[in-house]
Amino acid sequence: MRYLDEYRDPTLARALLDELHATATRPWSLMEVCGGQTHTIVRQGIDELLPAGIRMIHGPGCPVCVTPLETLDRAMAIAARPEVILTSFGDMLRVPGSDTDLLALKARGADVRVVYSPMDAVALAQARTDRQVVFLAVGFETTAPANAMAVLRAAALGLTNFSLLVSHVLVPPAMTAILAAPDCQVQAFLAAGHVCAVMGFTEYEPIAARYRVPIVVTGFEPLDLLEGILLAVRQLESGRHDVCNQYARAVRRTGNTAAQDAVRTVFRVTDRTWRGIGPIPSSGLTLADGYADFDAARRFDVDTVYAVEHPDCLAGEILTGVKAPTDCAAYGTRCTPRTPLGAPMVSSEGTCTAYYNAGRTAPERAR
């Protein structure tokens, strides 16, 4: 298939690997930010083919994984109300809250529906004026424009029965928090191409300059990632710390300005707590005051719902690259995709899921 198979060519992959082996003279630690990139790296065994000493650290770029536990509990409190239809993307339904998940709540009679777009939720609100329709709006900068457009559309239609439960997070503040941590091991980043397709990469330039780390905007296919790693290693070897764009076929430096305008209209930047990581200043989006009527947390008065993480889940240390999934005593035993203790094992983009599906085990369990 054109535009897909050509980015999975084994001959080109071998050539990139050979060049990497010829380029790397020292150990380096790189972090790919996106969970989709993590899955490609682990599924294709890219991290196991790299030169000795080149280490891939899997970052917090799974939106399902970093959605706070209290957001899920608030969603379930709203969904349990008889007047509500709660809508969501399918990958959110099995993410465990404190006591249950949305799929189990649906099985007990709650009206929880999977939609393919927030516009589907707006259309549902138009059709079901007798019910309150809530869309669980999570994700990075990639999903924010569509959610902003849904609010703008609902406002134009004068809908009073549509609202968002918002838990958007932003990539650059998370990268800054990782780099500022005293135990940070990251020396270069592979930035998520789809986020940069929306936002561009000007926000990354001050980060690269301040922390002296190369940042390479990278796609998601095996050749994208191998080339991104090679570009990062070249910079590390030469002592440079620039932002460069491997994903030029989809990303421009300034991004999609129309999408950015919609996001700036509907949302404002706020502090956000990341599941397993904790609070990161100015790392999230919430509805602007002019659109507060579409805030489901206010409408249903669930702002005071708080939660405590499962004590056996190492999500925070895994999402920041301090530990690998195989370092967790529960991994593959008490914690599996069928019985997840934390979001990194249930999400299709979670690092723990990637390791589990690839059959990776802890060294002592492999013996």
Image (spheres, rainbow, N blue to C red):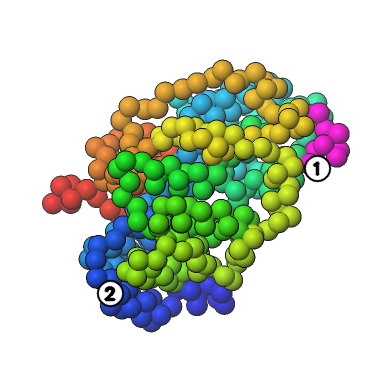
Image-based side of 222 in relation to 311, left or right: right
* Image vertical order of residue 317 relative to residue 48, above or below: above
Residue reaching furthest to the right: 157
Q: In this view, does 190 lie above or below 183?
A: below
Question: Would you identify the image quadrant in which residue 223 lies?
Answer: bottom left
- Residue appearing at x 52%, y 67% in the figure: 245
Q: Residue at x 37, y 33 (%)?
A: 341
Is residue 189 depicted above or below 270 in this figure? Answer: below
Magenta extent: 152-162
| Residue 318 point in image, percent of width and height | 34, 43
Q: Is mark 2 on a helix, strand or loop?
A: helix
Q: Which of 202 and 308 is in front in this view?
A: 202
Residue at image location 74% in from the left, 55% down from the top: 258
**Residues at circles 2 and 1 in contact by the CB criterion of under 8 Å:** no
The crowd level at tag 2 (other Cα within 10 Å; few <14, some 14-19, many 20+) is some
Q: Which residue is drawn at 71% across and 34% down?
A: 288
Given the image, on which type of amino acid does mark 1 rest?
Arg
Q: Position of residue 24 (x, y in %)?
A: 28, 71
Residue 4 falls left or right of residue 161: left
Q: In which quarter of the image is residue 3?
A: bottom right
Between the residue at mark 2 and the residue at mark 1, the CA separation in whole angstroms equals 52 Å
Do we see residue 41 in this rendering? yes
Side of 210 where 334 appears, left or right: left
Is residue 40 left or right of 362 when viewed as pictured?
Answer: right
* Amino acid type indicated by mark 2: His
Q: Name the residue under label 1.
A: 153
348 vs 307, nearest the viewer: 307
**Residue that mark 2 sits on:** 21
| Residue closest to the eye, 354 or 307 | 307
Determine whether the residue tagged by mark 1 lies in a helix, strand or loop.
Answer: helix
Categorize mark 1 by other alpha carbons within 10 Å: few (<14), some (14-19), many (20+): some
